[in-house]
Image (spheres, rainbow, N blue to C red):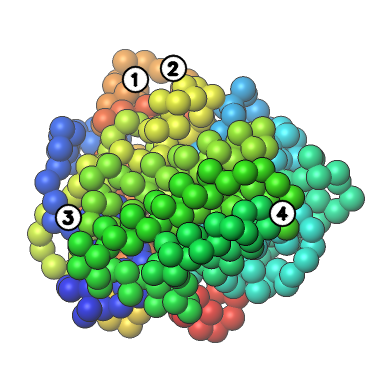
Amino acid sequence: MNHHGSPGARLGRSQLTRRAFLGVTAGAVGGLALPSAPALAAGTGGGVAPWIDRHAVPLSGTNPQQPAGELSHLRGVVRGAAIVGLGESAHGTHTLLRLKHRVARYLVEHLGFRTIAWEEGWGSGVAIDRYVTSGHGDPTAVVGDALFMLQTEAVLELVGWMREFNRGRPDHDKVRFLGADVLELRPIQFDEIRRHVADVAPDQREDLEAHLAPIDWRGDPFTQLGWYTQLPAAEQRMVIAHAGAVDDLVRALPAGSAAVSRADAVQHAHALLGFYEAYGPDGDADDVRDRYVTAIINRWRDRTGHRLVYSAANAHTAAVPRLLVSFPDDQPGDDTVERQLAGGRLRRQYGHRYVSIGISFDHGQVLTGWEVQPGGPAVYDVPPPDVSLVDHVLGQAREPDYLVDLRRDGPPPVRRWLEGAARMRIIGSAYFPANDANYAITVASWRGAFDAILHLDRVTPSRLLAAGQGLR
């Protein structure tokens, strides 16, 4: 699915975008109403900013190495949680990634969380996980093979800390990394499916190849995506049928000794099917991508028993059943769609054992433009938010950087603001500054979407590992 024209016109990177996976191409909005700007800006009155001032916990910084300090207030926010969703209002910022590292580190070191899941493909996540648990491999190489937006100094710092935390720990107490998404494929998925079948059911290798060969690895993630998205819908459905047959075959294999664990082989096949279904002709019908995200997280928790941090965009972590998403193009038109994403699914399954923490900011710079747009990836200035965005209200607080628990009570005007609809900034893999006010998610209930908010005044852009890395 290509927002900028036919699949054949723009290959690879232009299709590997949040817009592609959220299906944000002029589409109909369903049952959620888009509130008016005056209604959404009402929080600037009615004592909301003073209420935030009374309850905000100032943040002393985003350096993951500084003492836990004020993050101890998170203990009350996440008490009893099995999963904490940790959102972000923009990809491409060094500041938000370091804040996420700091929060995840607190949850691991002080509250016993043992998996950090990320908006990252399963296959590349496996390589990171094996490095942090065993020390095998080159950390720069495994991070450099991650999704383009994660090939940064901040993520390398996170991975390095995870490895140091695990040194000398028994396997059951190590912190793990989970690529909880189907954004990309990696050759490890194909290779290890074959190895597992060869070990436990060599007589089924021919059956496996009949289905795996037609959908096999094509050299790099963008070639894979370009090949698949250019196929006619009927041929895409044949690919999905082959991937489904591989999934069925692997799940039905007998138990046996194998170099590749059964759990890994099953998840390799499941994520393979998820990739093809999410990019397929029916991928938007049931928000396939986030259905797979939820399934990967659930299967991992069944496998490990871990309390888990799920890091993704605020759209994916918000705990509402449905929300509206708008990623405006440089052309006028309707770009708002309604979605059922992972956070809402997790809240439905786990109740309040799924805790949603959103992260917002007021202004600064982001590194984005991963989609094909003039100049490609670049640093963009992001202005203070429009008054129609809840981020504007958060920016009126006395403290520049803070944590606030949205579950706290307040006077009627504050309760109406907390319980009412809200538009919140979101910047993904493309950004046209002239349309800044329209980059937003809309939720029917602000407090229903997020249990707490971490707000920063200013952000700085991501720092790539090396010049040109991430631009495969």
- Numbered disc in front, either 1 or 3: 3
Q: Residue at x 64, y 69 (%)?
A: 142
Q: N-terminal of the two: label 4 or label 2?
A: 4
Inter-mark Cα distance, 4 to 1: 57 Å
Vertical position of residue 43 compared to residue 225: above or below = above
Quadrant of res 8: bottom left
From the viewer's perspective, is residue 180 above or below residue 301? below
Residue at which label 2 appears: 409
Residue displayed at 28% across by 68% down = 229
Q: Which mark is residue 415?
A: 1
Camera-nearest label, 4 or 1 = 4
The residue tagged 3 is 335
Q: Residues within 10 Å of mark 2 (few under 14, many from 20)?
A: few
- For badge 2, the amino acid type reads Asp
Rendered location of residue 190, percent (x, y) = 53, 65
In primary-sequence order, the first of circles 2 and 3 is 3
Q: Nearer the viewer, mark 4 or mark 3?
A: 4
Nearest to the observer: residue 104 or residue 446: 104
What distance separates the C-alpha of mark 4 from that of mark 3? Answer: 48 Å
Numbered disc 1: secondary structure: helix
The residue type indicated by label 3 comes to: Asp
* Mark 2 vs 1, N-terminal side: 2
Percent of width and height locating residue 200: 66, 53
Which residue is rendered at x = 62% and y = 59% of the image?
Answer: 202
The quadrant of the image that shows the N terminus is bottom left
Measure the C-alpha gap from mark 2 to mark 1: 7 Å
Local crowd size for mark 3, using a 10 Å CA cut-off: few (<14), some (14–19), many (≥20) = many
Circle 1 Cα neighbour tier, 10 Å, few/some/many (<14 / 14–19 / ≥20): some
